[in-house]
Amino acid sequence: MDLLLIAIFMVVLWLPLAKLMLASSSAGIAEGEKRKLTPLPPAPASWNSLWQYPDRFSAYYRDNFGFRSAFIRAHALVKHGLFHLSPSRCVLVGRQGWLYYADDYSLEDYRSLKPFTQPELARWKSVFEERQAWLAKRGIRFLIVLTCDKALIYPEFLPVGIKRRDGSFRIEELADYLTRNTNIPFVVLKSDLERTKRDGRIYHRTDSHWNDAGAYVGYREIISKLGQWFPQLRPRRLGDFTLREIESPGWDLAVMMGLEDIVHEQNCQLVPRVPQRFRVTEVDQPPRLDPKWNCGRIVTEVEDDRLPRAVILRDSFGSALVPFLAEHFRRCEFLWQYEFEAKHIRNPKPDVVILMMTSRRLQWYVPSNPELP
């Protein structure tokens, strides 16, 4: 019996290495981890590389040992299924099936442990005023849109142990400062989203972003604000869309846990009742447009000379807005960036530049302006 146990132990110990030796040496992609696995290091060609080789091979082995995916999958199933915990440090398992993003300062954003200082607020004001003045000289409007990370709108489903200090969120501090000290036009979506969530779910349970119903709130407020400058712009009514709920594999947070086939999403879609007019004319990922609009650059056009042109600087929260906003611009260039670059303003010249930013980025992003001609 002892020999049998020893034999089983040795097989389990050496089987991952044996499988690795029989597999291809080229590095693959860890889909759930959203990164490329460490490739096999080349054979050492010098004394220096010889001393570095053990560490490099260890990194390769950690990423590529045999049955790695199966072990990770089993770990995820046990940790989530038995203990209701996340196997990924980037995801928090909340209550009633809600998942929350725990990276990129999302929890710091909710907990409000570090309020803005006056010099920080003054810097944001200065950068925005410089952009507004530069654009105004060229007859271009400037609009800032601030939206909210999921925890700010749905704190009630966070794990019990996640607490925050009393006081305002950074997004509220910045909005209050801009209101009191500048004439910069901006839209802050927090109160609108909080009101709308009473009528139905507006964020995905298994994703860090809003669903179509939440994106509609942002779209409605943006177009309503732009209508003060461009009277021909009016947001479509909610009744112009059909609400459709589709059960699908879990979205980005479930993918990070490796459990998208276990943790499903009830996806709320707003389908327009009339055909959309816009067409995509340029995209940075040919030949296929990402179905969730997660592309670095998208250009859309509508054949209507009465409509304005726009450049929209945005983050991932802007993805769901693309099909809503594109309907209202003769030409709209969506750029996944915050950086303000003159090359995007010159040809063709837009009528408005919109900067859209989600609340968690206010925790770490330091705004600046390039040398503008």
Image (spheres, grey):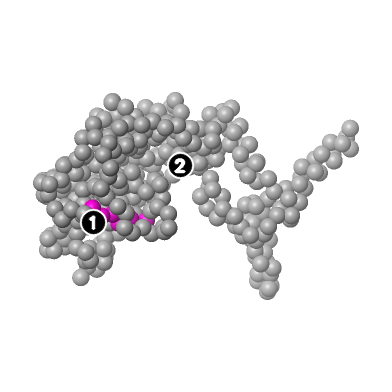
Residue 366's image quarter? bottom left
Secondary structure under the numbered disc 1 in the rendered image: strand
Residue at figure coordinates x 48%, y 32% from the top left: 264
- Image x and y of residue 161, in percent: 44, 29
Camera-nearest residue between 343 and 373: 343
Amino acid type at circle 2 is Asp
Residues in magenta? 296-302
Q: Which mark is residue 252?
A: 2
Residue at figure coordinates x 70%, y 54% from the top left: 23
Count of number-bearing discs: 2
Figure check: 194 above or below 124: above
Amino acid type at circle 1 is Arg
Residue at figure coordinates x 33%, y 59% from the top left: 282
Whether residue 113 is visible here, answered yes or no, is no
Q: Which residue is mark 1?
A: 331
Q: Is residue 35 left or right of residue 357?
A: right
Figure check: 83 above or below 207: above
Secondary structure under the numbered disc 2 in the rendered image: helix
What's the distance in space between the residues labelled 1 and 2, CA to CA?
A: 30 Å
**Disc 2 packing (10 Å; few <14; some 14–19; many ≥20):** some
Helix, strand or loop: magenta stretch: strand
- Image x and y of residue 64, in percent: 65, 52
Q: Examine the structure image and report whether residue 124 is included in the region drawn in magenta.
A: no
